[in-house]
Image (cartoon, helix red, strand yellow):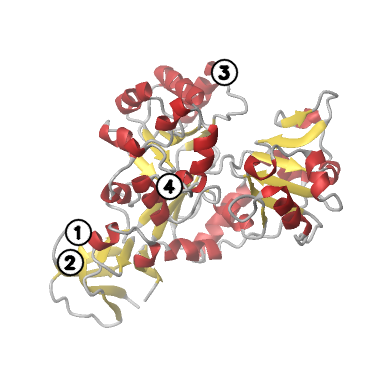
């Protein structure tokens, strides 16, 4: 095929037109365009042709690993007995380990090695908290991984100094202690993203190894991952080698389990800026955001600096975000996924500050919606719907005043103008699609001028 001709599409706010895609770009827009030899034709029937969606914060390898892990949290697992059934029924991997994901305290309280031993002790078991920040190992896993409290500051210790089995943000350590996993296949992730209309992603995993970067580049080169990929975890002295894989802002994590000093954070931001990189800073608490704003007071803001999550933004910080020109990349999908937990556990005074959208946009803060998948729901249409309705599973509304229109939610997910022909063809006109925000309305996805989903 030498190109695509999309006939009778609702495009760019105009009446229905024909759109020609050639050489990876939109080559022509007009009425009654003639088909060229070798050109594939899609009859759009008035369906909207919109820019591709960009998920600005997800984790590709974690998504791939999730598919071969045991679900350990709601809605599929509830209660201690349900967790025991899930872990005992899980088949170990090729190294004899059981890997669980998505755990929440509402299932069986705080887990440690002893608690996991009571659920399954015959195999090494590790269970990841749904936040992605905590791994819990049973006693067999602690022994197999040779944990010593001095190995990493994230290893939690009991009163006697022995590991409890709880490891905070210690993925780098675990990679060196666990049996090597088989190569992760990113093809299913690429196909699912294409089905949802996603043509560009930002992998937000910090401190990527050369092997991890190479794995993503290989998947993009061979087409199994057809999306354009930006990586936040490229080292400051690193680079990428694939044109559709680029280094994004440099990821800095302000862990809620232990914030850095102001001097240390200022130094790290300054170091990234000195390498010509903006920063993407993980902030999920009020304290973390205030610390970050204080650090920017010294370093200044570089174009492209962004706040990841902004899970709690006090009202008085909104003008500061706007004044500094900081972009916020947030995940209202968590409200649909965990809203009832927030309503139960978060102090009432903080609920209006959760995953703000409307107040940020109205203040002039650039806002990008994203998934944080696999820790949040991957479906961008569900995330947009959550930004509009802000409804928990029970039907309760979380922060009604932060709801946005469907059009604003969609704009916060679109790829920016000027990128290659990354497009999504919908089955229906745009107004109809905005009325229901459903992935079922995606008919075809075009990434870099190539049809990667639909027909």
Q: Residue at x 49, y 62 (%)?
A: 190
Position of residue 268 measured from the top left corner of the image (x, y, whole percent): 52, 25
Q: Residue at x 74, y 51 (%)?
A: 81
- Residue 261 is labelled as 3
Q: In the visual, does 216 lie left or right of 424?
A: right
Tag 1 near tag 4, CB within 8 Å: no
> Mark 1 to mark 2: distance in Å?
10 Å
Comes first in the chain, label 2 or label 4: 2
Looking at the image, is mark 1 or mark 2 nearer the viewer?
1
One can see residue 217 in this view:
yes
Question: How many residues crowd mark 3 within 10 Å: few (<14), some (14–19), many (20+)?
Answer: few
347 and 235: which is toward the camera: 347
Q: Residue at x 30, y 82 (%)?
A: 38
One can see residue 236 in this view:
no
Which image quarter: residue 183?
Answer: bottom right
Comes first in the chain, label 1 or label 2: 1
Comes first in the chain, label 3 or label 1: 1
- Residue 29 is labelled as 2
Position of residue 413 measured from the top left corner of the image (x, y, whole percent): 35, 50
> Mark 2 to mark 4: distance in Å?
30 Å
- Reading the image, the residue beneath label 4 is 370
179 and 223: which is toward the camera: 179
- Reading the image, the residue beneath label 1 is 12
The secondary structure type at the circle numbered 4 is loop
Q: Quadrant of the N terminus?
A: bottom left
């Amino acid at each position: 095929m030498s190109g695509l001709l999309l006939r009778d599409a609702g495009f760019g706010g105009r009446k229905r037109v024909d759109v020609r895609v050639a050489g990876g770009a939109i080559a022509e827009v007009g009425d009654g365009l003639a088909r060229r030899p070798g050109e594939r034709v899609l009859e759009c029937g008035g369906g909207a042709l919109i820019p591709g969606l960009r998920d600005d914060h997800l984790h590709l390898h974690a998504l791939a690993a999730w598919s071969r892990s045991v679900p350990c949290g709601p809605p599929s697992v509830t209660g201690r007995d349900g967790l025991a059934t899930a872990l005992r029924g899980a088949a170990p991997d090729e190294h004899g380990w059981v890997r669980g994901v998505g755990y929440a305290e509402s299932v069986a309280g705080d887990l440690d090695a002893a608690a996991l031993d009571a659920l399954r002790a015959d195999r090494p078991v590790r269970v990841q908290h749904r936040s992605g920040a905590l791994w819990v190992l049973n006693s067999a896993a602690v022994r197999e991984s040779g944990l010593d409290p001095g190995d990493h500051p994230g290893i939690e210790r009991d009163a006697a100094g022995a590991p409890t089995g709880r490891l905070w943000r210690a993925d780098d350590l675990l990679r060196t202690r666990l049996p090597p996993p088989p190569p992760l296949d990113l093809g299913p992730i690429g196909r699912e993203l294409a089905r949802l209309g996603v043509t560009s992603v930002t992998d937000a995993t910090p401190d990527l190894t050369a092997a991890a970067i190479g794995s993503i580049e290989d998947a993009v080169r061979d087409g199994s991952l057809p999306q354009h990929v930006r990586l936040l975890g490229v080292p400051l002295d690193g680079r990428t080698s694939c044109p559709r894989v680029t280094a994004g802002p440099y990821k800095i994590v302000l862990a809620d389990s232990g914030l850095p000093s102001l001097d240390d954070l200022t130094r790290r931001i300054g170091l990234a800026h000195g390498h010509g990189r903006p920063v993407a800073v993980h902030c999920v608490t009020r304290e973390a955001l205030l610390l970050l704003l204080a650090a920017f007071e010294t370093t200044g803001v570089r174009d492209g600096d962004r706040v990841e999550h902004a899970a709690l933004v006090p009202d008085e910080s909104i003008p500061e975000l706007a004044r500094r020109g900081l972009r916020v990349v947030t995940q209202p999908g968590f409200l649909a996924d965990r809203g009832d937990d927030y309503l139960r556990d978060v102090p009432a005074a903080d609920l209006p500050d959760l995953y703000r959208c409307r107040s940020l946009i109205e203040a002039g803060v650039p806002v990008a919606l994203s998934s944080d998948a696999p820790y949040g729901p991957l479906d961008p249409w569900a995330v947009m719907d959550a930004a509009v309705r802000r409804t928990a599973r029970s039907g309760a509304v979380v922060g009604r005043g932060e709801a946005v229109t469907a059009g604003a939610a969609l704009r916060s997910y679109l790829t920016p103008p000027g990128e290659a022909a990354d497009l999504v063809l919908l089955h229906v006109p745009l107004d109809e699609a905005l009325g229901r925000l459903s992935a079922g309305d995606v008919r075809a996805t075009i990434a870099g001028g190539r049809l990667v989903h639909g027909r």
